[in-house]
């Protein structure tokens, strides 16, 4: 688990970017799944890579949430 001190580097702009990216990932998931079999291997690799990056952001958002950092001030 991430230490709270490691979360200090994430300012409001970072948090907003993480939230926007996760929103796009969740919003596009059904369409992406529908088109998956029609994609060539390179396209699948590209999408998988992007999804993994955004999934990592989701993990960080969870840590920020548990640290009380997602509350509006």
Image: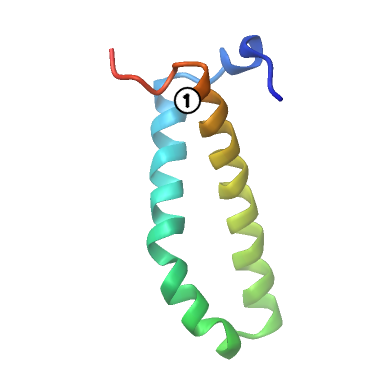
For the image shown, how many numbered marks are present on the structure? 1
Residue situated furthest bottom in the rendering: 38
Left or right: residue 42 versus residue 67 is right
Determine the residue positioned at 53% across, 32% down: 62
Pinpoint residue 66: horizontal percent, then vertical percent.
Answer: 51, 22
Judge whether 11 appears above or below 41 on screen.
above
As drawn, which residue projects farthest toward the left? 73
Outermost residue, front side: 66
Nearer to me, 40 or 6 = 6
On the image, the x and y values in percent for residue 39 come to: 59, 85
Is residue 48 depicted above or below 12 in this figure? Answer: below
Specify few, some or many for label 1: CA neighbours under 10 Å numbering under 14, 14-19, or 20 or more. few
Display colour scheme = rainbow
Q: Quadrant of the N terminus?
A: top right
Return the residue nearer the eye: 50 or 70. Answer: 70
Element carrying mark 1: helix
The image quadrant of residue 12 is top left
Q: Residue furthest top?
A: 5
Name the spot of residue 16 as percent of width and height, x first. Answer: 38, 33
| Residue at screen point 48% across, 74% down | 32
- In the rendered view, tell whether residue 45 sits above or below residue 26: below
Instruction: Name the residue at 68% across, 15% down.
Output: 3
Q: Which residue is drawn at 69% across and 77% down?
A: 42
The percent position of residue 73, horizontal first and vertical second, equals 28, 12
Q: Name the residue under label 1.
A: 65
């Amino acid at each position: 688990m991430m230490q709270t001190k490691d979360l200090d580097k994430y300012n409001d702009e970072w948090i907003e970017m993480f939230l926007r990216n996760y929103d796009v990932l969740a919003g596009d998931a059904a369409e992406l799944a529908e088109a998956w079999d029609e994609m060539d291997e390179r396209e699948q690799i590209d999408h998988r890579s992007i999804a993994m990056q955004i999934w990592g952001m989701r993990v960080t958002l969870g840590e920020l949430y548990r640290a009380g950092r997602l509350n509006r001030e």
